[in-house]
Image (cartoon, rainbow, N blue to C red):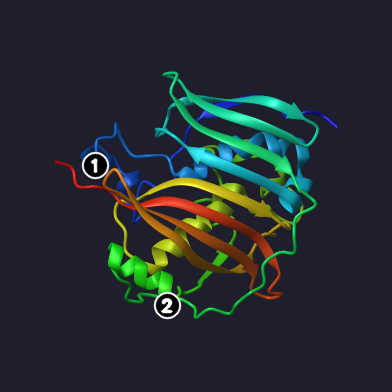
Amino acid sequence: MDLAQNWQAVAYNPSTDSQNQIHSDEMAKACGFKGGLVPGVTVSSYLLHPAVITWGQSWLESGHAKVVVHKPLYDGFQFEVKLDNVSKDAYSASLIDEEGTFCASATVNLNSNFSAPPILLKHKILVKDQDVPAATREAMENLKHIGMHALPARWSQKTNMASYLKDKNAMPSIHNARQSGGAFANASFMLGLTNWVLAGNAYMNPWIHLQTESQFYCVVEDNTDLIVECAIESLYNKKGHEFLDLNVNVFFKESSKCAMSAQLRAIYKLREIS
């Protein structure tokens, strides 16, 4: 089996019109950044790209990764993903942008010896235009106590997260609609579900994705309906920012089989800028 290799590309921000305006230039600059932040899940997909290229469907069926975003990555910036500790079924990775900034890191491996996947708990489903609380500490503590709604989602090539590269044709073949039967869901979309289920339960603007630890169990084929369940594990304050750790499980709507489990760490409320 070939070993995973370094790779480089140009960063792409597919979420400039997101409800989370940290991805827009105006809001991001107001928060002290150079411009709109490339989504953390897109940054994560860059670190996982060598796994997709090297292990293909095996990665989608048994991949495990922990990805930490350390510094922002900006749209249009060139970057390189540098690998270390590479073996036939694992590697560690660092993402460095064109200015030499260490933006993100990951540990990545195939993990076929995972424990039994989570089971669907049949949480109440979020509905369109449902009223949700502003993400205060009190509101988040309440959601931790009473539980959260599940998010219905659908993977297809029509979603803006269908590509983590500006040129869709440059995507790995397994994620490219040109392959027979359509494209399998990519990491940017799958990890993005951790963001969307959280945002569906509480209004946050702006907020920042920091980290995910994820286990994949099977491929998600084109035009597949999903159910995303979540629960807050912990809430804490650090340097004036409000953080949370969120456990997320993604299931196939039709079979209730688990496709991915993950833990998201995020700043759901940034400290006030003086």
Q: Residue at x 31, y 44 (%)?
A: 24
Q: Position of residue 102 (x, y in %)?
A: 47, 25
Element at badge 2? helix
Q: Residue at x 35, y 45 (%)?
A: 23
Few, some or many C-alpha atoms within 10 Å of disc 2 (few <14, some 14-19, many ≥20)? Answer: few
Q: Which residue is mark 2?
A: 146
Q: Position of residue 117 (x, y in %)?
A: 71, 64
Q: Nearer the viewer, residue 128 or 193?
A: 193
Few, some or many C-alpha atoms within 10 Å of disc 1 (few <14, some 14-19, many ≥20)? Answer: some
For the residue marked with disc 2, what is the amino acid? Ile
Residue 219 in the image: above or below residue 40: below
For the residue marked with disc 1, what is the amino acid? Glu
Q: Which residue is mark 1?
A: 26
Q: Measure the alpha-carbon separation of dots 2 and 1.
A: 35 Å
Q: Is residue 84 left or right of residue 269?
A: right
Q: Are marks 2 and 1 in contact (CB under 8 Å)?
A: no
Residue 8 in view: yes
Q: Residue at x 35, y 75 (%)?
A: 129
N-terminal-most mark, 2 or 1: 1
Q: Position of residue 1 (x, y in %)?
A: 86, 32
Q: Position of residue 226 (x, y in %)?
A: 60, 68
Q: Residue at x 75, y 51 (%)?
A: 62
Q: Is residue 124 left or right of residue 74?
A: right
In the picture, the disc for residue 64 is none
Q: Nearer the viewer, residue 59 or 24?
A: 59
Total marks shown come to: 2
